[in-house]
């Protein structure tokens, strides 16, 4: 499936088959109010029929923003950066925004050692972890080699829903 969500100001977020599955998912922080448009479709004649669109809204608690740059290079030649964040437990939402059409991957390791990874998206990607543990999280932002994202600036926003707290640990 293919899913596109358009904000009241015309900003589009889209996904074509999230991860290894054939269901599409778009997750993001809605930064404006108004009428949002959702478009769902398939690929080819075999994908005709009814679609089920499900959405949820989470109350926003404490928010922390961190800006950085993909200034390090992995042994494989991938530009990356990382940071540590002290987060309360609850629903953790990490949103990575950048001014490029290049794809960046957002991944995190929670205090209990579990690894979480968002789907790579151009311009913005979001990772949502419901029931996340409190403590020190390590967050990585990485791009593919040769995609023009070397030394790219980005903004990482951490949100802990239901009144939690977020703090960047430098």
Image: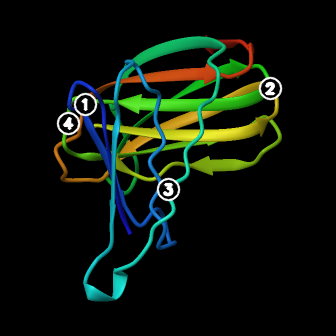
Q: Residues within 10 Å of mark 2 (few under 14, many from 20)?
A: many
Numbered tag placed on residue 100 in the rendering = 4
* Whether residue 95 is situated above or below residue 41 in the rendered picture: above
Q: Quadrant of residue 56?
A: top right
Q: Left or right: where does residue 164 sit relative to residue 14?
A: right
* Whether residue 119 is situated above or below residue 94 in the rendered picture: below
Give the position of the N terminus as an image quadrant.
bottom left
Which is nearer the N-term, disc 3 or disc 2? 3
Q: Mark 3, mark 1: which one is toward the viewer? A: 3
Residue extending farthest to the front is 50
Residue 109 lies, in percent from the top left, at 67, 41
Q: Residues within 10 Å of mark 1 (few under 14, many from 20)?
A: some
Q: Residues within 10 Å of mark 3 (few under 14, many from 20)?
A: few
Q: Are marks 4 and 1 in contact (CB under 8 Å)?
A: yes
Residue on which disc 2 sits:
89
Which is nearer the N-term, disc 3 or disc 1? 3
Q: CA distance from mark 3 to mark 2?
A: 28 Å
Q: Quadrant of residue 151?
A: top left
Residue on which disc 3 sits:
53
Q: Mark 2, mark 4: which one is toward the viewer? A: 2
Q: Mark 2, mark 1: which one is toward the viewer? A: 2
Numbered tag placed on residue 13 in the rendering = none
Q: Is residue 38 visible?
A: yes
Residue on which disc 1 sits:
152
Q: CA distance from mark 4 to mark 1?
A: 8 Å
Q: How many marks?
A: 4
Q: CA distance from mark 2 to mark 1?
A: 30 Å
């Amino acid at each position: 499936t293919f899913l596109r969500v358009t904000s009241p100001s015309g900003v589009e977020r889209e996904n074509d088959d999230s991860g290894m599955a054939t269901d599409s998912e778009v997750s993001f922080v809605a930064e404006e109010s108004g009428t949002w448009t959702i478009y769902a479709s398939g690929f080819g004649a075999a994908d005709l029929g009814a679609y089920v669109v499900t959405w949820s809204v989470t109350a926003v608690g404490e928010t922390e923003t961190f800006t950085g740059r993909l200034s390090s290079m992995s042994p494989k030649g991938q530009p990356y950066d990382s940071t540590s964040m002290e987060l309360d437990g609850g629903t953790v939402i990490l949103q990575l925004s950048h001014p490029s059409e290049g794809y960046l991957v957002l991944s995190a390791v929670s205090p209990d050692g579990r690894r979480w990874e968002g789907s790579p998206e151009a311009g913005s990607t979001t990772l949502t972890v419901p029931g996340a543990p409190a403590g020190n999280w390590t967050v990585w932002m990485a791009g593919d080699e040769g995609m023009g994202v070397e030394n790219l600036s980005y903004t990482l926003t951490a949100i802990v829903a239901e009144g939690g707290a977020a703090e960047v640990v430098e």
